[in-house]
Structures are given as structure tokens and as C-alpha cells.
Amino acid sequence: MPLDDATLAKELLEAPELPEDIEFDDLDEEARRELRTLPKGLAETVGKHLVAAGGLIDTDPEAALEHARYAKAKASRVAIVREALGLVSYHAGHWAEALSELRAVRRMTRSDSHIAVIADAERAMGRPERALDLAKEAANSGLPRDVQVELGIVAAGARRDMGQLDAAVVSLQGPDLDPAKRDPWSVRLFYAYADNLAAAGRRDEAIEWFLNAADADDDEETDAAERAAALSNDDLPFAEGAYPDDDLHEDEPQELAADDDAEVLEEALAEGLGDEVVERVEGDSAEGLGDEVVEQVEGDSARGLGDEAVEGAEGDSADDLEDEAIEPAGGDSAGAPNRAERPDDD
């Protein structure tokens, strides 16, 4: 039932103050189309608060949250509104609220476009196992490539949260981990890989990949170069290929002892990581990792991170915020949510 002018005016007075230059037309076309299920006056009001939320997310996330919450109070049955609140809550560090809203959007839209953000919020809530479960569940759901890579970064972070440092490194290896590539997700993937290498004590490799990330980062959105410099000046006693726990690893990387061992490794990894990763693991990082890493990668979420994941499917819901406010998070930091460890974290 349409709101009369008096009621609408009263509700506008109770709303967070809108910047003077906010216009309904500033909202993207798909979001405006979804809001047309509302009465015209209410649709414009809600839309303006969504625009305000998107504009404030970088500079004042709590103020952005007020606008998004107000929009939900007026249009809680509109998926784009719940999506906006979920993403703003995530960027503001309100993990439980983000989970609640984005789960609702997942039910309403039957889309996994924000599955990486949901998984990362689970990490932030101290539930890395749940993040890995989500990665496994989404393995065959037709994720777009950017979401698939982002989910892989989150899953690696979850493994790191659980102390599975070597498995986190292995799980990020694949065809996208190519220093010559310049895909939209390359910088974030290179950075996350470097960060996990550093956490595993593989300093020289970490420096190399931070430099790869810096080289790909044309917009200088990350601190990859600074991280590489800091590691170069660090006095950590780890040589390339060595590990911090000398009780578990010899000074020199261990080669696979026999063909049987190589076959076991290939069988375990091929299910989720693909031939290229198997080759990389056999030739490079598998040396010295041992059966425990294979079991970790096989048993938890590697099946959701491999080449067989469906690429290029559509499923992104309409974005009502500015692009930089919508992008899901990535990176790796033990005990911290994925958004907090992104190279360009707002």
C-alpha cells in the first residue's frame, strides 16, 4: 500500500541525512529496476540511501551502515537492499550481520555470487572449518572465475587459521598462479600466495611472489613492494625451500622417494587441483611437505578449488554500491578475517 505524503515525510525526517548531491539515478540500472517493485516515492528514498551507503563505505563505514540499515527497514523484502546491507556490514567489520544478510540474499536469489564473502565472514567468526565446507559445497555451482579464485583465497586463509600452512600454499597453486598473467584477480592471488609463503617460513619464495604482485599492481593498490622489502631486510634464518620447524623438515627439501609416492600424491591432488598443479606440486612445493599436507588438501576443500570448477557462469546479483565497495575480500592472515588481510583493505 503506497505511503501517504505525511507518513513518507515523517520517515524521511527519521532517516540518516542524505548528502545534497545524491540522486536516485546514481544507482545502477539493474538496482533501480529491482526497486521498482516498491511505490515510486519509497523506491527513490531507498535508492538514495543505497547510493549514500556506497559513497561512504571507504571514508565512513559506520555512516554507510546507517544508510544501509535504514534502506532495509523500508524494503526488507528486496534482495538488492539486503545485499547492500550485507556487504556494507562486512566492510564495516560487523561479521554476524553480514552473514545474516548475505545468507538471506543467497536464499532469495539462489545465487552464490557472494559465497567468498560469506565464507570469509565465517572465518572472521572463528569458524574456518565452515569456510572450507562452503568452498566444497560451491565447487560445482557454476561460479564465475573471479568468485572461484576469491573463494580459493579465502579457503587458503581458513587452512592457515587451522595451522595448515603448507596446505594453504599448495591449495593456491594452479593455472592462474602465473607471473605473466594479468587477469583482474592476478594481483590479489599473487599477494595471497606470497603472504602464505611468508607465513610458512618460505621467505625467498615469498619475496619473489610479493615482487610479482607489485609488478602486476599497476594501480599501486597493495603494499606488495613494501612487504618484499621488509622480508629482504628481515633476519629470519630461513633459506629458500626451508621451513621453520627443523624437527619436521630437513635442511634440504626431500625428494619423493619412489614412483609409488608420486602416484599417491598425484591421485590425492588430481581430484581437485588439476594436472598443472600436480606437476607443480611434484616438481616444486611437494618436496618436503609429506602425506599430511596431501591429506589436508584432499580431505577438506581442495576439490572446490580445482580446474574442474565451472568458469564463466553468470550469477552476480545486481550491485547497488560502487564497485570498490562490492568486491569480495582476499589474502591470508592467521586469526583475522579475509577483508582485513586484503592488500587494499579499506
Image (spheres, helix red, strand yellow):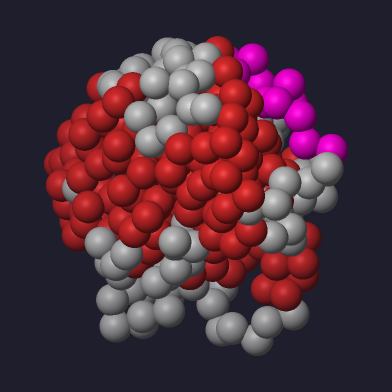
Q: How many marks?
A: 0
> In this rendering, would 298 be left or right of 15?
left
| Residue 285 or residue 261, whichever sits in front | 285
Magenta range? 21-32
Query: In this rendering, does residue 108 appear at all?
Result: yes
Q: Could you tell me residue 320's position as x and y percent?
A: 59, 30
> In this rendering, would 183 be left or right of 141?
right
> In this rendering, would 310 be left or right of 30?
left
Q: Residue at x 22, y 52 (%)?
A: 130
Is 181 located above or below residue 214 in the figure?
above
- Quarter of the image where the N terminus is located: top left
Q: Residue at x 48, y 53 (%)?
A: 90
Q: Could you tell me residue 204's position as x and y percent?
A: 62, 65
Q: Residue furthest front?
A: 6
| Residue 286 or residue 302, whichever sits in front | 302
Residue 29 in the magenta stretch? The answer is: yes
| Residue 12 or residue 93, whichever sits in front | 12
Q: Could you tell me residue 74's position as x and y percent?
A: 46, 38
Residue 325 in the magenta stretch? The answer is: no
Q: Quadrant of residue 31?
A: top right
Is 130 located above or below residue 47 in the figure?
below
Q: Could you tell me residue 258's position as x and y percent?
A: 21, 47
- Quarter of the image where the C terminus is located: bottom right
Query: In this rendering, does residue 168 appear at all?
Result: no
> In this rendering, would 247 be left or right of 183?
left
Is 120 located above or below residue 319 in the figure?
below
Q: Quadrant of residue 343?
A: bottom right
Is 127 located above or below residue 328 in the figure?
below
Q: Residue at x 59, y 30 (%)?
A: 5
